[in-house]
Image: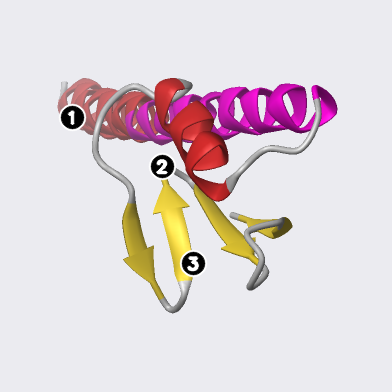
Amino acid sequence: MRKAAIAISVLAVALVVSNAWWAYQLLDAGVSYTYQGASLEESQQALSQTLAIIYLMSSGDASRDQIVTAANKARSAGEPFEKNGFPWVGQLGLRFSDDGKLVEVTL
């Protein structure tokens, strides 16, 4: 009888431990998928902004204001801001020359 009680206790502990491990794995996967979704959204936003800028640049000479406006229209919300000499529109930092030509785009 004692051996049966020990076996049942060991199996019960193993069941609780395995269920705790599965619960942790499920929680970890949920957090990972959430971060992955946010990263995907940011990448899609940067891509749509970049494509808007490329389309505008291919149609001819575009001014600084036109480029910033096109990049801002392609993103979902928020206002552009200036940081370290770069106007930032969403995920993109734009650098312009003194005459207003687009020189560099950074993430």
- Between 15 and 45, the one nearer to me in the picture: 45
Residue 26 place in picture, x, y as percent? 35, 24
- Between 63 and 89, the one nearer to me in the picture: 63
Q: Which callout, 3 or 1, points at the residue further toward the start of the chain?
A: 1
Q: Is residue 27 above or below residue 107?
A: above
The residue drawn where x is 57% and y is 30% is 49
The residue drawn where x is 70% and y is 26% is 56
Q: CA distance from mark 1 to mark 2?
A: 57 Å
- Between 59 and 51, the one nearer to me in the picture: 59
Q: Is residue 58 left or right of residue 4?
A: right
Q: CA distance from mark 3 to mark 2?
A: 12 Å
Determine which quarter of the picture holds residue 51. top right
- Does the segment drawn in magenta span residue 23? no
Q: Is residue 57 left or right of residue 10?
A: right
Q: Which residue is mark 1?
A: 9
What is the chief secondary structure element of the magenta stretch?
helix
The amino acid pointed to by label 1 is Ser
Give the quadrant of the C terminus.
Answer: bottom right
Determine which quarter of the picture holds residue 23. top left
Give the quadrant of the N terminus.
Answer: top left
Q: Residues within 10 Å of mark 1 (few under 14, many from 20)?
A: few
**Residue mark closest to the camera, 3 vs 1:** 3
SS state under label 3: strand
Instruction: Say whether residue 17 is visible.
Output: yes
Q: Which residue is mark 2?
A: 90
Q: CA distance from mark 3 to mark 1?
A: 65 Å
Instruction: Say whether residue 42 is visible.
Output: no
The residue drawn where x is 83% and y is 27% is 58
Q: Which residue is mark 3?
A: 86
Q: Which callout, 1 or 2, points at the residue further toward the start of the chain?
A: 1
Q: Which residues are magenta?
A: 31-59
